Amino acid sequence: MALTDTAARTAKPREKLYRMADAAGLCLEVTPSGSKLWRFRYRFGGKAKMMGLGAYPTITLAKARERREDARRLLANDIDPTAHKQAEKTAQSALAHTFEELAREWYAYNSPRWATSTAAKALQYMEADILPVIGQRPVQEVTRPELVALVRKVEKRGALNVAGKIRQWLSQIFRYGLAKGSVESNPATDLDVVAAIAPRTKNHPHVPLSEIPILLGKLDAAKCDVMTRIAVRLLLLTGVRPGELRHAPWSEIDLESATWTIPAARMKARRPHVVPLPHQAVASLLELKEITGSYPIAFPGRNNRERPQSENTVNKALHQIGYEGRQTGHGFRHLLSTELNSRGYNRDWIERQLAHGDQDEIRDTYNHAHYLEQRRQMMQAWADSIDALCAGLNVVSIKRKA
């Protein structure tokens, strides 16, 4: 006998769960707590199954019968209604999943594997260029034309390196989503095909060695922030990358042994780098320690001492003293390489000092801890030659045997 709405409404709970049948597999399940739940009983693949159709009275008898018929139509097409319901639920959940949620999950998963500077830049560009544009979009709805427009916006302001990174990160985020089942395709593939053509690569500009005394003199005369002056001198005396210097904690620097050991996590080549410190570098670091020694970072930011100095600080100071387009913080590495190679030093010593990788991976692995003492002598001679030049002496480059 078919169930009536009156019977459903007046059904009372009992000590044990019981069911009131309607027709064609529909029944109302009454629990000891008084809940009333619609159930549809059916067979699929030779097995008895049951699926929920909602709670009474929110789902009326008439609505429950509609849902039963929808399930029976699926069965007629050899589709399990329970599996179909779960698939729809998963699809709706994925649609509600925003791109920002997926992107931040991808970042949290990958950032511990990156160098600190890489993680910071990835987060900076993600929050500045990607998330404001598509962050709140359902991740399943993001299209390739949207991503092309996003990247072109970055290219138009001339930030082609940033655009390249963003293309790479977008593809990785969607690949991560594919692996998780959050998306069914990767709309960020092949974005490089429509990338703007990059201008011919230029080396970071640097002045000739003969002009270094003038540059340092102008820096001192400008009464530039003392930390910035020290940063410029250390870049010149060590050849490290500006990012490696900015993020350096005091714990990496051993002034007694005149050695700075940068862990693999902070290095571009993902291997530890030992930097021998000439006497002049040690003196500059001792001066700096009087100012920032109470902080974890050797070059803390002006407004937030827990964060490193801005990446623009050194280049801005060089710009202010008239060296825009002629000298950058990174350019000191090119100056060092040019000068040391011209003086006949062993190329392997120079490449190791600059923390460049060897194209021969086996040789690179074997040599990674070599040449520290040779480099210490080489860098001390380099620092002495700068001192002599600044003192107005006539310094002659002397060929060294490899």
Image: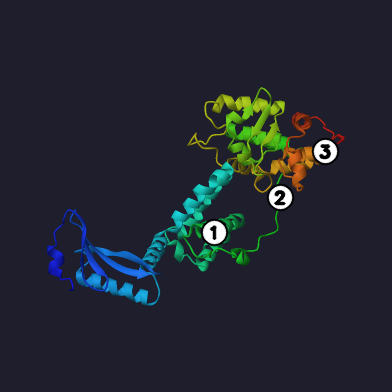
Disc 3 to disc 2, C-alpha distance: 22 Å
Q: Which residue is mark 1?
A: 175
Nearest the eye: 206 or 57: 57
**Viewer-nearest residue: 227 or 86:** 86
In the rendered view, tell whether residue 130 sits above or below residue 243: below
Name the residue type under label 2: Asn
Q: Single out the mark in the foreground, 2 or 1.
A: 1
In which quadrant is the N terminus drawn?
bottom left
Q: Is residue 147 above or below residue 312?
A: below
- Other residues around mark 3 within 10 Å, as few (<14) / some (14–19) / many (≥20): some
The reply to whether residue 64 is visible in this rendering is yes
Q: Earlier in the sequence, mark 3 or mark 1?
A: 1
Image depth: mark 3 or mark 1 in front: 1
Secondary-structure class at tag 1: helix
Residue furthest to the top in view is 256
Q: Residue 376: where, in percent of width, then height? A: 75, 30
Q: Crowding at label 1, few (<14), some or many (≥20) Cα neighbours within 10 Å?
A: many
Tell me, yes or no, whether the two marked residues, 2 and 1, touch with CB atoms within 8 Å. Answer: no
Q: Amino acid at mark 3?
A: Asn
Circle 2 is placed at which residue position? 203
Estimate the spatial distance between the alpha carbons at disc 2 and disc 1, rounded to whole Å.
Answer: 34 Å
Q: Secondary structure at mark 2?
A: loop
The quadrant holding residue 8 is: bottom left
* Residue at horizontal 16 percent and vertical 56 percent from the top: 14
Three-letter amino acid code of the residue under disc 1: Arg
Question: Which mark is on residue 346?
Answer: 3
Give the SS element for disc 3: loop
Residue drawn at the location 59% of the way across and 31% of the way down: 226
Pointer 3 with pointer 2, Cβ within 8 A: no
